[in-house]
Image (cartoon, coloured by chain):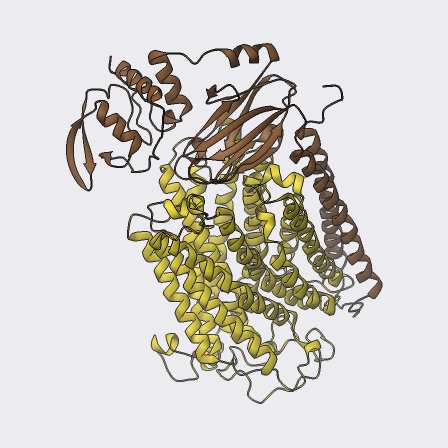
Chain colours: A brown, B yellow
Amino acid sequence: MNQQLLTTTQAVDPVFIWIFGISAFLLLGITAVTVWFLIRYRRSRSPEPTSQVSGSVWLEILWVALPTFLVLGMFYYGWAGYLALRNVPKGALQVTATARMWSWSFTYANGKTSSKLYVPVGRPVEVNIVSEDVLHGFYIPAFRIKRDAVPGMKNHAWFVASNAGSYDLFCSSYCGVGHSAMITTVEAVPEAAFIAWLTEQNPAGAKRGQEVLKSQGCLGCHTLDGTKAVGPTFKGIWGHEVTVVTNGTERTITVDEPYVRRSLEQPNADIVKGYPAVMPAFKLSPDEVAAIIIALKGTAE
Amino acid sequence: MTNSEATTVQDERGFWKDTGKTGITSWIFSTDHKRIGFLYFYTVFSFFLVAVILGILMRIELMAPGRTIMGPQTYNALFTVHGVIMIFLFILPGFQGVFGNLLMPIQIGARDVAFPRLNLLSWWIYITGAATIITSLFTGSGPPDTGWTFYVPFSARTGTNVTLAVFGVFLIGMSAILTGLNFVTTIHRLRAEGMTWGRIPLFVWSVYATAWVQVLATPILGITLLLIIAERVLGAGLFDPGRGGDPLMYQHLFWIYSHPAVYIMILPAMGVISEIIPVFSRKPIFGYGMIAMSSLAIAAAGSLVWGHHMFTSGMSDLAVLVFSFLTFVVAIPSAIKVFNWVSTLYKGSISLEAPMLFALGFILLFSIGGLTGLILGSAATDIHVHDTQFVVGHFHYVIFGGSGFAFFGAMHYWFPKFFGRRYREKLALAAWILLFIGFNVMYFSMMVLGVEGMPRRYYDYLPEFHALNLTSTFGSWILFAGMVIMLVNLFHGLLRGEPVERNPWGGATLEWSIPTPPPTDNFVEEPVVTHGPYDFKGSGIP
């Protein structure tokens, strides 16, 4: 970067200070005047009203003009800050954020995917935001940015992390039972570490399967440690007999490869008894499905 | 209280007794605007109490991170039902249905509204809609879990009972349209001799502006809700991008109604405040014309600001520019009202009785709600706080701190008129103090949480948000305690309160000139109006 880059936080925070400042001043002023009137003109001290004045043209003009002037200033300042959020600096790193019920997945230009948003410190990042099902919201409070993920639409936002660290990333637009669990982090790391991470291959075998479970958000609802969550745990599920509800009737099946494949494509065809039918369908590549199956087999041991 | 006084009150029970008819049918088939007003009051207020309990349960769940007393699906249904009841069953029909009905005809010197039977039909449609919504909670596959905004595509996909709930809201919209038509006609046609437009009480002005919003904006809600039903039942695909639809179109249609609806909630509240402040200051309202015109300005400009709910949605930047600008324009008439109310106090003789306390509470809380609205109107800052707890805090300051406190104030102000008895002033003061403190502890904490980045509609949250959530929950208990004391006090006053004469506060509007409680025909003789609504000297009030 040749010139000093204005971060999104630096674009927004002065507007907050300006509007909060004026608001606090007005509120204190109104409250102080009211309290003073209440004390000065209380009935015990002022048994009769000493004026029957019912208006003043000059005062009315004053308090039409004063708020008009103030709010137009706020409007302009707010708009200028908003433009800074919309205009992406040249040369920004491109990442696609895919939202689905109820997880985030980030895809980089070289095809690498991740459930956390890794970014290099000091380099602007443009996030292209898409949704696979319902509305979601891409929100990073630390960078003051938010943009909805709308199915059928491509939205964008940008930010730059000035310091290395881990920042919360929330889903801000209500999306169902897993809404508040649809959170992850932005991991801002030095440029060199980022390049090393980006070029590292996605792992293979069971490790790869666990990566897929994580990046696809499966672990948002299914645990690996035996805890009951929104969906049944994966621990020891492989080869196990479970009672499922199919079209309203109960039957017992064994968790095997066909069942796992069917559960990914038509998740609500066979619902494990006692759990809600809320899982969305997943379209995964054949090697991702194979990796998941290896990982599930691994949890049985 | 002596026996003879009690008998006097019993003998002169006005519209409660003078038709000679008793029993439930004399109420639910009555065309008397006062009886219909009370039908609305008891129904909307019961729903309000139910939704308060739901709110308290939500706050208990949020006391600590993770599961406290319920699971996520239950929590999502709770905030949906809390919102739907508070908005559609309480505050939207509340002011017009209760205080519009009870007072507007008397304040303009009429015997009743223009179409009394249509008025009764409005209540019946309302109660049918309410019953439909309540049914949707207990039938099908569970209560709706979409939030009160019913955003697509989620509302089109969820398996919960959305269709029935949405149909109930549609019916309630029909009821509001009929009420609006009725009130506009009444105010135009049935004013008493001498009740010129310049002598209409400001409460009636606000009822008038609100009625226009009801008539003009509610049909769009009706259409939007029918489109959701078409989407769910017929698979219309209007909002489904997979079939060429657009989810953003739903948001536009929804907010074209639902933002003006905020003004349906707040305008009559402002009217109540404009009645109370002059009476308890014994001074004419400052800037009558400006307050009346600012109601109309808010109703008009408020219809053009809906897009500020969509700054992060992906709507074009040009639309953000226009809607942000228009939003700031609405701030101006609201500010004018606040300045005029405060100026009315100047050189008055101020009595801090319960209605006045609620009015002053309104001014402060509504000001905080309005000023935090500036943060949401400004495009840059809205991006950060949109869809966070800040928004939840902000709109509760406007709708609860504003409309809610005005509703309580109106209950205390007109209580003696309709029941002929008084509540205890000291208990009312105690209740008000608890309500005011509890309210601020509860909702100010939420606004801080929002600025810190906690999103709304979150069942669970990160540990850093714990302290403020706990504080907010404590606030909800203080608020609830205040509400219980207020209700006990009013109920006790209703049964045992000291009897009052026709004009306990020294008001100059027409309702204070007729017997207490008002007789069914309101006026013994056709009134002839010779003075303005706040001309205390001219109307011979000491």
Expressed as whole percent of the image width and height from the top left, the position of residue B202 reads 65, 70
Residue in the foreground of this view, choosing between A37 and B257: B257
B150 over B226 or under it: above or below: above
Expressed as whole percent of the image width and height from the top left, the position of residue A137 reads 51, 36
- Specify the farthest residue to the left: A251
Horizontal placement of B36 versus B322: left or right? left
Residue in the foreground of this view, choosing between B153 and B444: B153
B399 over B464 or under it: above or below: below
Q: Let me know if residue A132 appears in the view.
A: yes
Q: Quadrant of residue B509?
A: bottom right
Q: Quadrant of residue A123?
A: top right
Expressed as whole percent of the image width and height from the top left, the position of residue B285 reads 72, 67
Residue beneath the point at 41% across and 30% down = B66
Q: Quadrant of the C terminus of chain A?
A: top left
Q: Quadrant of residue A205?
A: top left
Residue in the foreground of this view, choosing between B491 and A206: A206
Residue beneath the point at 19% across and 42% down = A248
Expressed as whole percent of the image width and height from the top left, the position of residue A300 reads 24, 15
Horizontal placement of A253 versus B133: left or right? left
